[in-house]
Image (spheres, rainbow, N blue to C red):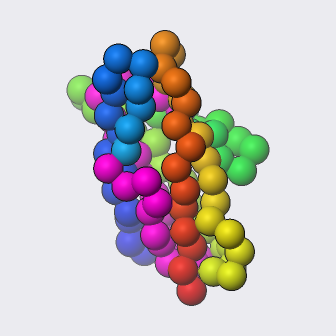
Amino acid sequence: MAKADVQVSFSGRTISVDKQKVKIKKNNDTVEWSGGQSFAIILQGQTIQAKQNGSTWLASAGPFSNEASNPPIKYDITAPNHDDLDPEIEVLP
């Protein structure tokens, strides 16, 4: 099982990621988000709260079973006093 890493950054009220669309393999890969402060991932109707590990906050999800022919999975990243960000996960066969 492989892991796709996504760096989450915060500046002012803005949340940004180093990969606006992360690509993973169906039924195999997971996604791990890491950032310098508390945040949450809202994905497919559930909220994944990042957990602190030293000075880094981590959240992970997957593997995903969506077919590659489906549209990308949209999710939100939220954090206190920041505007939400809505990147995507593309599941490949």
Quick one: which residue is furthest to the top in this view?
81
Q: Horizontally, is 64 left or right of 6 in the view?
A: right
Up-down relation of residue 6 to residue 21 (above or below): above
Residue that appears at 47% across and 28% down = 39
**What span is in magenta?**
18-40
Measuring from the top left, give residue 26's x and y in whole percent.
57, 78
Measuring from the top left, give residue 56's x and y in whole percent.
28, 32
Residue 52 shows up from this direction: no
Measuring from the top left, give residue 2's x and y in whole percent.
38, 72
Residue that appears at 46% across and 60% down = 21
Up-down relation of residue 47 to residue 24 (above or below): above
The answer to which image quadrant residue 7 occupies is: top left
Residue 79 shows up from this direction: yes
Measuring from the top left, give residue 30's x and y in whole percent.
48, 63
The image shows a total of numbered marks equal to 0
Which sits in the foreground, 88 or 53?
88
Which sits in the foreground, 32 or 84?
84
The answer to which image quadrant residue 93 occupies is: bottom right
The magenta stretch spans residue 48: no
Quick one: which residue is furthest to the right in this view?
45
Residue that appears at 70% across and 42% down = 46
The magenta stretch spans residue 20: yes
Q: Horizontally, is 66 left or right of 15 in the view?
A: right
Up-down relation of residue 47 to residue 14 (above or below): below
Residue that appears at 55% across and 30% down = 84
Q: Point out the image quarter for the N terminus.
A: bottom left
Which sits in the foreground, 66 or 3?
66
Q: Horizontally, is 91 left or right of 55 in the view?
A: right
Quick one: which residue is furthest to the left in this view?
55
